[in-house]
Image (cartoon, helix red, strand yellow):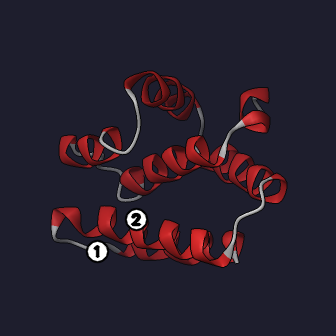
């Protein structure tokens, strides 16, 4: 596992999570990437996106679990994250089985 995830801020973790959500149905659209880009600055997006592209799904989940364990999220922050995931999932007007499955995985990790 890359060491960079060990030092992620909550914001960086959120961007990584959103990238994972955008990739859940194996089709990362330009609209989804634009939504994510608008939630951060270009340097943070570029850095996290570069790392995300090098990770497979298992590595991504491991990094997320490690970071969630280290960072302390309030219930409100977790609810906000879930809302952002859902907004991204529904941005293409579809909610695939793969996206539904990722929601279950993330719920297990986050809660």
* Relative height, residue 82 to residue 51 (above, below): below
* Relative height, residue 86 to residue 34 (above, below): below
Relative to 79, 100 lies left or right: left
Residue indicated by mark 1: 95
Quadrant where the C terminus sits is bottom right
Residue 109 horizontal/vertical position (percent): 70, 69
Image quadrant assignment for residue 72:
bottom right
- Label 1 vs 2, first from the N-terminus: 2
Residue found 37% across the figure and 71% down from its top: 86
Quadrant where the N terminus sits is top right
Is the residue marked by circle 2 packed among few (<14), some (14-19), or many (20+) residues within 10 Å? Answer: some
Relative to 37, 76 lies left or right: right
Foreground disc of the pair 1, 2: 2
Element at badge 1? loop
Residue 59 horizontal/vertical position (percent): 69, 43
Residue found 44% across the figure and 46% down from its top: 19
Q: Which mark is residue 33?
A: none
Residue at mark 1 to residue at mark 2: CA–CA distance: 14 Å
Is the residue marked by circle 1 packed among few (<14), some (14-19), or many (20+) residues within 10 Å? Answer: some
Farthest residue toward the right? 70
Image quadrant assignment for residue 46:
top left
Element at badge 2? helix
Q: Does the residue at mark 1 contact the one at mark 2 (Cβ under 8 Å)?
A: no
Residue found 67% across the figure and 54% down from its top: 61
Residue indicated by mark 2: 84
Query: How many discs appear?
Result: 2
Relative to 71, 90 lies left or right: left
| Residue situated in front as seen by the camera: 101 or 92 | 92
Residue 12 horizontal/vertical position (percent): 58, 40
Residue 110 horizontal/vertical position (percent): 68, 70
């Amino acid at each position: 596992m890359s060491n960079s995830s060990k030092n992620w801020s909550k914001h960086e973790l959120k961007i990584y999570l959103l990238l994972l959500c955008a990739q859940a149905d194996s089709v990362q659209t330009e609209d989804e990437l634009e939504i994510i880009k608008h939630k951060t600055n270009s340097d943070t997006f570029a850095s996290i996106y570069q790392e995300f592209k090098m990770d497979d799904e298992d590595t991504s989940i491991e990094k997320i679990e490690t970071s969630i364990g280290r960072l302390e999220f309030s219930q409100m922050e977790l609810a906000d994250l879930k809302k952002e995931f859902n907004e991204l999932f529904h941005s293409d007007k579809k909610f695939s089985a793969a996206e539904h499955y990722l929601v279950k995985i993330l719920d297990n990790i986050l809660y």
